[in-house]
């Protein structure tokens, strides 16, 4: 019987693709938009592997230079070699840091951005959910507390999957069912990449409103002041957030401004071509390897008598970690963690 990822795993073991390309197969299968599919294809064609190989080869050359110096006696040790190795490792470290910076965009492409709609009962959360989706997904009612559980749907903006979550209204309640809904809403708010927090323009802010707003990341929160046709009891002086939109969601006024703010705040406004981006697995290894390179550079800079021996040992360990990205170094546990996520066969 075929196991999960059987054929992709065989391709890797037979040297036809590396682990980064193998992961691209899964990314392509799970792609939720054309942009994420194109990025996966670029990764499958080896664009990301090429960058990883360049970093690995640079570190390998530096390690070889250090090891070659160990053949010299203490009197003949070519100390002039050390500054050159340090410069090479600095360049390598900077390349790794630039790759780490692509993780956020890769996270959005692969998993989608979690955008949570929050606010007190009956402020227009479900109306906004339906407006952004372009369909009636959530029940809209003048009765406060209609939504008691989280409702999640996906919409594509500029090629990025947006996981919209409508939540229960935030208020103190004696109803155990509604209270559980509020608890789930708070959990989603803590996990969100972006908050859409709605306020009723006709009602002044309460102490609970101030407490909720104070707990939200100002750079990751879009405050939506809704129902502006009913009056304006909230002024900008009441808010300290960077992004505020005034709306009449029942008529659709302001929805386009909300979309524009989502695109801007998630930094997905670029119209450039999709590119291969690192995954969470890559990020963890790169972060650890960057720390090890820092340690290696520190050892070499110390000019300690045994610095080259210690730096070589540290760099070998770093290469072992980095080799697990493309599969130059692998073990059964690593392969199982990657291919177990595939469909049967594939």
Image (cartoon, rainbow, N blue to C red):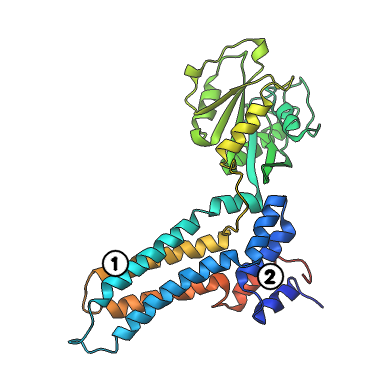
Q: State whether residue 36 appears in this view.
A: yes
What residue is shown at x 68% (from left), y 24% (from top)?
A: 121
The answer to which image quadrant residue 317 occupies is bottom left
Q: Are marks 1 and 2 in contact (CB under 8 Å)?
A: no
Q: State whether residue 173 appears in this view.
A: no
The residue under label 1 is 298
Estimate the x, y position of residue 62 in percent, counting from the top left: 37, 75
- Where disc 2 sits, the SS reads helix
- Where disc 1 sits, the SS reads helix
The answer to which image quadrant residue 229 occupies is top right
Estimate the x, y position of residue 272 in percent, counting from the top left: 60, 48
Q: Please give left or right for residue 117 compared with residue 214 in the image.
A: right
Q: Rate crowding at label 2 as few (under 14), some (14 to 19) or many (20 or more) other CA atoms within 10 Å.
A: many
Estimate the x, y position of residue 127 in percent, counting from the top left: 74, 26
The residue under label 2 is 339
Q: How many marks?
A: 2
Estimate the x, y position of residue 159 in percent, counting from the top left: 68, 46
Q: Earlier in the sequence, mark 1 or mark 2?
A: 1
User: Is 279 situated above or below 174?
Assistant: below
- The quadrant the N terminus occupies is bottom right
User: Is 158 situated above or below 239?
Assistant: below
């Amino acid at each position: 019987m075929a196991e999960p990822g059987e054929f992709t795993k065989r391709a890797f073991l037979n040297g036809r693709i590396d682990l980064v390309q193998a992961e691209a197969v899964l990314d392509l299968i799970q792609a939720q938009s054309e942009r994420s599919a194109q990025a996966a294809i670029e990764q499958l064609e080896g664009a990301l592997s090429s960058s990883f190989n360049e970093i690995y080869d640079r570190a390998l050359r530096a390690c070889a230079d250090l090891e070659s110096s160990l053949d010299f006696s203490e009197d003949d040790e070519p100390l002039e070699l050390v500054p050159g190795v340090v410069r090479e490792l600095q360049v390598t470290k900077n390349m790794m840091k630039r790759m780490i910076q692509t993780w956020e965009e890769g996270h959005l492409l692969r998993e989608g951005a979690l955008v949570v709609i929050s606010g007190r009962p009956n402020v227009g959360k479900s109306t906004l959910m339906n407006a952004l989706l372009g369909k009636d997904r959530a029940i809209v009612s003048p009765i406060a507390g209609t939504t008691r559980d989280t409702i999640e749907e996906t919409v594509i903006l500029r090629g990025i999957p947006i996981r919209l979550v409508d939540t229960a209204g935030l208020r103190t309640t004696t109803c155990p069912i509604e209270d559980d809904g509020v608890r789930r809403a708070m959990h989603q708010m803590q996990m969100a990449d972006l908050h859409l927090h709605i306020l009723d323009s006709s009602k002044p802010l309460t102490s609970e409103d101030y407490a909720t707003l104070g707990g939200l990341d100002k750079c990751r929160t879009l405050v939506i002041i809704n129902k502006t046709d009913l009056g304006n009891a909230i002024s900008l002086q009441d808010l300290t957030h960077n992004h505020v939109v005034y709306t009449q969601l029942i008529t659709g006024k302001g929805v386009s401004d909300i979309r524009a703010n989502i695109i801007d705040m998630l930094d997905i406004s670029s119209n450039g071509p999709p590119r291969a981006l690192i995954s969470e697995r890559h990020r963890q290894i790169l972060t650890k390897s960057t720390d090890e390179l820092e340690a290696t550079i520190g050892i070499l800079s110390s000019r300690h008598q045994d610095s080259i021996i210690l730096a070589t040992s540290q760099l070998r360990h770093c290469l072992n970690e980095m080799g697990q990205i493309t599969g130059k170094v692998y073990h059964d546990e690593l392969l199982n963690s990657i291919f177990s996520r595939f469909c049967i066969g594939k």
